[in-house]
Amino acid sequence: MLIFRQLFDPPSSTYTYLLADGRSGAAVIIDPVFEQVRRDAALIEELGLSLSYALETHVHADHVTGAWLLKRRTGCRIALSAKSSAEGADRYLVQDDVVAFGGRNLQVRETPGHTSGCLTYVLDDRSMAFTGDCLFVRGTGRTDFQGGDPHVMYRSVHQQIFTLPDACLLYPAHDYRGLTVTSVQEERRYNPRLGSEVGEGDFAGYMKNLGLAHPKKMDVAVPANLKCGRPESDVGVTEDPGWAPLRYSFAGIWEIDPHGLEEQVASVQILDVREPQEFVGPLGHIRGAVLIPLGELAGRAAELGRDRPIVAVCRAGSRSAQATVILREAGFGDVANLAGGMLRWRAEGHAVEGGSA
Ligand SMILES: N[C@@H](CCC(=O)N[C@@H](CS)C(=O)NCC(=O)O)C(=O)O
Ligand SMILES: [Fe+2]
């Protein structure tokens, strides 16, 4: 079984792809984005996967890759084109190389034209391919910088992508309209830039007149990506909160486990967001907890101190997750959700005040 997820970075309209062999849990991530590494690492952890590779389709000009951060977090290897001129990768790929993850693999096809080091990764059974900024859904990547060349791109698409099976699904690295996937057959027929009867000269004429402004982040992104996303200085880049051992969930919530809270109980404020009758009901409450029901929290947040981190608590951990969102909106920085709520707190044997045995 193949595990497959398409992830999106809204500011840069970048798609990141996570693929894993369902049997072994070995995974690869294609084109991770620096600012989304925490999210992506949370998903990898929640799905119980182990990351073998962070793969780049090319040296991006519009966003910084998350490859280096993912390597630091997970120990994965970084791989990209041997023609990329990037330093800091563990493997430099060329045409027909195979990148294995468990029992599955991706085959490398060189598809220059957007940059001189662009790759397309083709899944072992040719059911899907990841075309980077070469072929988009009814479009193509631009060809006006980083060694780009419309003639080279035209040949890459026709020789390396349109030769895949008609039904092969194509996943681009970007889409600026929200389109997510296409197929070889569709693009051969309907790609307005180089599908159907459009010739190489027609395509080059089209591309030379695109008139696009350079990507806003280009001056930062290209140098950083030539180092696989390694920041100039390690200080503070994506430090996790230091006040307790927290976990970031794919749902976007910082969580603390019951035993983590037990260790911090003296130095944090515990905010119980259940209804008053629950607070004094059979589950009891944690000693020292302040009660503000979720529905009143936005209006009463000023009652909470800003000197100590806040841990939100409810019955099962869902209302309190929303409480952390409300608190962040109210300007509280150090907030976390008690994972599993009072149910898990009690099940793991932690003390409660009130409640029934
Ligand atoms: N406005 C975007 C431009 C992004 C851009 O130029 N993207 C490249 C890929 S790195 C591209 O090929 N764009 C094609 C297009 O916009 O039609 C930005 O500032 O980041
Ligand atoms: Fe690009």
Image (cartoon, rainbow, N blue to C red):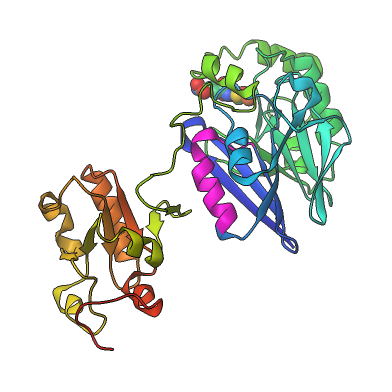
Placement of 177 over or under 212, stated as above or below: below
Position of residue 268 measured from the top left corner of the image (x, y, whole percent): 25, 55
Nearest the camera: 182 or 93? Answer: 93
Q: Is residue 10 left or right of residue 4?
A: left
Ligand 2 picture quarter: top right
Position of residue 227 measured from the top left corner of the image (x, y, whole percent): 64, 23
Tell me, yes or no, if residue 188 can be seen here: no
Position of residue 65 measured from the top left corner of the image (x, y, whole percent): 59, 31
Span of residues in magenta: 31-45
Placement of 272 over or under 78, stated as above or below: below
Looking at the rendering, in which quadrant would you find the N terminus? bottom right
At 29% across and 65% down in the image, what residue appears? 319
Tell me, yes or no, if residue 280 can be seen here: yes
- Main secondary structure type of the part rendered in magenta: helix
Looking at the rendering, in which quadrant would you find the C terminus? bottom left
Placement of 223 over or under 320, stated as above or below: above
Q: Given the current orientation, which residue lies at the most extreme right position?
A: 96
The magenta stretch spans residue 154? no
Q: Is residue 155 left or right of residue 301?
A: right
At 82% across and 31% down in the image, what residue appears? 93
The magenta stretch spans residue 38? yes
Position of residue 89 measured from the top left corner of the image (x, y, whole percent): 72, 30
Q: Given the current orientation, which residue lies at the most extreme bottom position?
A: 357
Nearest the camera: 231 or 197? Answer: 231
In this figure, what is the number of numbered marks? Answer: 0
Q: Is residue 262 left or right of residue 125?
A: left
The part of the image, by quadrant, that contains residue 113 is top right
At 39% across and 57% down in the image, what residue appears? 255
